[in-house]
Image (spheres, coloured by chain):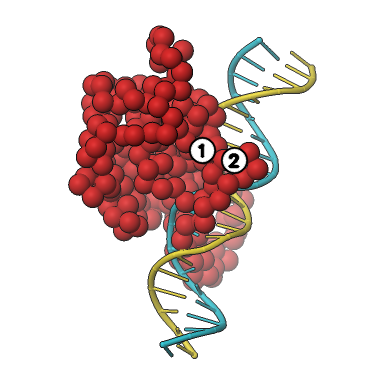
Chain colours: A red, B cyan, C yellow
DNA sequence: AAGACTTCCAACCGCCTATCG
DNA sequence: CCGATAGGCGGTTGGAAGTCT
């Protein structure tokens, strides 16, 4: 399922994320937020590109992310929105709290697309019958699309999961105890990236300070070293990792 | 049992837009 | 205005896992 691990020309790692990388990223973003995705991996001790880190965080590591087990209601919402606005996965994701656009996209391509095609083919006859009203229907649909887009944008802005800045602020108010990750102190290859001298915004990430208390969300890990989300009611990242490792 | 084929999904890639100096 | 940089999005791919023959 996962891609093989390899390194690109600049020495950045590609492919499957290891539990260790997940811990580093989750711990860093939970504590400091995503202040700059391109610089972040450097400070988090990751040999990854910023985009890769961002994707990993948004799709798997961030709090209250849901995995698998789409409900009937969620399926219907996806089908309905897709029929209205097309492949606007981020907009659709804004209507499904806890679901990432990538996850929804995959779900669409793997199961809903076929279902949609089937339903479309069975309803073709009725569509033909109603073709006389197609012009009216189109203009109504366009209006709906605009409204949907506006609504989606509003909820997108309000969603704590979607914006970087809200991630930072919300993360900064949740309790942190990174020392409990894997039941041990996190040990990084790079002990200290730079001498600490000020606020987070000017201060490079001091990895060894994980054992200090702060107000961030803590990605906790159970005895087996798997991530346990304190938020997800459906499937924690720990459950996901359990299925892998 | 084993090879071929299919399904599923994590992750990458390239493009677009926004922001900043 | 323009170029550089960063974030975000949608399309696509690689490959493990499952199923079929």
Residue A109 badge: none
**Considering the image in quadrants, where does the C terminus of chain A appear?**
bottom left
Q: Position of residue A244 (x, y in %)?
A: 35, 57
Is A199 drawn above or below residue A57 in the view shown? Answer: above
Is C12 drawn above or below residue A43 in the view shown? Answer: below
**Residue receiving disc 2:** A11
- Badge 2 crowding class, 10 Å Cα cut-off, few under 14, some 14 to 19, many 20 or more, is few
The mark tally for this picture is 2
Residue at position x 26%, y 42% in the image: A182
Q: Position of residue A127 (x, y in %)?
A: 54, 64
- The residues bearing labels 1 and 2 have C-alpha atoms spaced at a distance of 7 Å
Is residue A134 or residue B5 the one in the foreground?
Answer: B5
Residue at position x 37%, y 26% in the image: A207
Left or right placement of residue A77 versus residue A226 in this view: right
Q: Position of residue A161 (x, y in %)?
A: 38, 34
**Residue receiving disc 1:** A47
Q: Chain of mark 1?
A: A
Is residue A132 or residue C17 the one in the foreground?
Answer: C17
Residue A93 visible in the picture:
no
Left or right placement of residue A155 versus residue B14 in this view: left
């Amino acid at each position: 399922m996962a891609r093989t691990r390899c390194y690109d020309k600049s020495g950045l790692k590609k492919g499957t994320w290891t539990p260790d990388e997940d811990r580093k990223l989750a711990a860093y973003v939970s504590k400091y937020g995503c202040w700059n995705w391109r610089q972040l991996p450097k400070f988090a001790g990751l040999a990854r590109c910023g985009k890769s880190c961002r994707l990993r965080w948004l799709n798997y590591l961030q709090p209250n992310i849901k995995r698998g087990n789409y409900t009937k209601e969620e399926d219907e919402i996806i089908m309905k929105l897709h029929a209205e606005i097309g492949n606007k996965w981020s907009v659709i994701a804004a209507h499904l709290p806890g679901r990432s656009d990538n996850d929804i996209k995959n779900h669409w391509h793997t199961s809903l697309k076929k279902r949609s095609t089937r339903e479309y083919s069975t309803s073709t006859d009725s569509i033909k019958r109603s073709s006389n009203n197609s012009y009216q229907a189109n203009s109504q649909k366009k209006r709906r699309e605009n409204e949907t887009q506006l609504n989606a944008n509003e909820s997108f802005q309000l969603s704590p999961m979607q914006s970087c800045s809200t991630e930072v602020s919300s993360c900064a108010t949740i309790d942190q105890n990174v020392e409990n990750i894997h039941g041990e102190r996190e040990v990084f290859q790079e002990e200290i990236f730079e001498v600490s001298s000020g606020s987070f915004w000017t201060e490079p990430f001091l990895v060894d300070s994980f054992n200090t208390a702060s107000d961030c969300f803590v990605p906790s890990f159970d005895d087996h070293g798997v991530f346990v989300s304190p938020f997800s009611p459906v499937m924690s990242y720990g459950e996901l990792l359990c299925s892998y490792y």
